[in-house]
Image (cartoon, coloured by chain):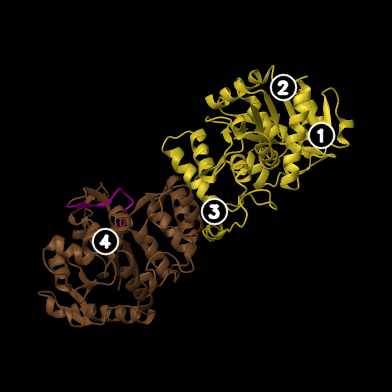
Chain colours: A yellow, B brown
Amino acid sequence: MNVVYLSGGVGGARLLEGLARAVPVASLTAIVNVGDDFNHWGLRICPDLDTVLYTLAGLSDPQRGWGLRKETFRTLAAVQRFGGDDWFRLGDTDLATHLMRTEWLARGETLTAVTSRLARALGVPVAVLPMSDGQFETHIETVEDGTLSFQDWLVRRAALPAVARVLFRGDAAASAEVVRALDQADLIVIGPSNPYVSIDPILALPGVREGLSGKRVVAVSPIVAGRAIKGPLPGMIEALAHRPPSAGAVAAHYGELLGGFVVEDGDEVTVQVVPCLATRTVMKTRQDRLLLARTVLSFAERMCC
Amino acid sequence: MNVVYLSGGVGGARLLEGLARAVPVASLTAIVNVGDDFNHWGLRICPDLDTVLYTLAGLSDPQRGWGLRKETFRTLAAVQRFGGDDWFRLGDTDLATHLMRTEWLARGETLTAVTSRLARALGVPVAVLPMSDGQFETHIETVEDGTLSFQDWLVRRAALPAVARVLFRGDAAASAEVVRALDQADLIVIGPSNPYVSIDPILALPGVREGLSGKRVVAVSPIVAGRAIKGPLPGMIEALAHRPPSAGAVAAHYGELLGGFVVEDGDEVTVQVVPCLATRTVMKTRQDRLLLARTVLSFAERMCC
């Protein structure tokens, strides 16, 4: 059974790491949001791709939720001395990823090829695909502070400016590798990522929704008891869906796309319409990731019958 | 008295640091070789400019002769993991210099302006000018290994391929700041740098030799008792001047440009023609630098009488 997994950053990466141990790696493909990608210190930064790669490689910092464990920030300290931007904290080891990616892209390699090289070097056995090799930028139209690029809003402004709308800019198409993976997929799992800014960018690419139609699609709720494990999703649900944050609001956002929805125990009362499985979705340990992955897979298998 | 100092890397930087304490800083301008500059990891690296800035800031590593003291190499280790180039060892703190420079250059700032920003941030009070904002590359035509870019020959190949010729490529002109500094100079001091690959690039710029004519020019020998403190100069003298390495060979190379020449005690026997001062030129301590600077200045003052 070929499984395609749609992912943003931290939460999405954790379940993916569980899936990578629950299924044969050759049958698993991750399609990762690149709408958050941006240039910083002249380097190309792909936050979600890096979080996915580092998490799959077992290198991500478990506390911070981003970047590498045992990271140091000596370059950052020196950049601060030069008055350079320090709102996005690039670590010394992490920097190598961005340096190599930027250099390889400058030589004309696609982001897909670059990501594959990075994954190989990090010992990641799962196929990790950027959703596109094209131009795609997520912007946040705020109520009072104009339109901000995503990292500017999320990190520099600490997600404080009230959100009016999420905008996607660019003319990106899904890569050939993404189209092929979707075509061959028996099951699509949407990770517990932010639907507005992590999953919608993937779904917005021409052909992706068509590629999902007729497939089994299961999502895992990123909202647990009205809150997000990490990130600005609760406020975005209030601002964009005009309702209190809940797992049900996420299910409603995905709508008919979903064939099934996995939520935290107790959150099933917020969900209408889709077949819903209530279980423990919060992943604190590696074992939690594996158990949730297995639960999602067996739920999906039952769906088809 | 306005002093203009022509400099390569390590040796040149050390005497410059002494001069910066021997004269009012406002009267001292350093013109630095950029023929060694190159791109590495997608970043613009200016080895001589950085050595000069770090030495003047008191930050350079006294043992290694390049880079920063107390440097770490975490990014380099991660780059190695990705199979990236590791023959040029960029340190974590040093990296910030190259990141900022590359970003500022990409925004359209001149290397002169960028260097001035870096100098200010590092607390360097002396005017440090790259010799040019234009395109200028030193290449080494080797006897058996073709033509190599300078860092490729010096660092990657450890200066082992025999030298047939030094080539300068590009259409660079001296910057307006360099032309002005030379015009206002009362004394030109050529540091104890490699004449072929550190000083000749500066002299090769259109207008620089004319700017020096009629000025007092004093050089300090980079050869001490037939050897160089650092670098490949002895072999280059043998290959390019077809004579044993000596202070006299350096004086002969500069020829009529020199109004005076400062050599290590004992080396005066190798020097013909120019007025020559023999003294202790090896700079092991900061005090050595100051003493040599004062000796050079008083020698130059006597020359004019």
What's under tag 1, amino acid-wise? Val
Q: Could you say whether the residue bearing mark 1 is in a helix, strand or loop?
A: strand
What's under tag 3, amino acid-wise? Thr
Mark 1, residue position: A263
Q: Quadrant of the C terminus of chain B?
A: bottom left
The mark closer to the camera, 2 or 1, is 2
Q: Could you say whether the residue bearing mark 4 is in a helix, strand or loop?
A: helix
**How far, Cα to Cα, is label 4 from label 1?**
68 Å
Q: Is residue B216 above or below residue A174?
A: below
- Left or right: B252, with B211 as reference point: left
Q: Which quadrant of the figure has residue A169?
A: top right
Residue A93's tag is 3
Pointers 2 and 1 within a single chain: yes
A44 or A69, nearer to the observer: A69
Q: Earlier in the sequence, mark 1 or mark 3?
A: 3
Mark 2, residue position: A216
> Can residue B213 be seen in the rendering of this structure?
no
Magenta segment boundaries in residue numbering: B131-143
Q: Is residue A202 above or below residue A21?
A: above
The mark closer to the camera, 4 or 1, is 1
Q: Is residue B76 above or below residue A172?
A: below
Q: Marks 1 and 2: in contact by CB < 8 Å?
A: no
What's under tag 4, amino acid-wise? Ser
**How far, Cα to Cα, is label 3 from label 2?**
39 Å
Residue B198's tag is 4
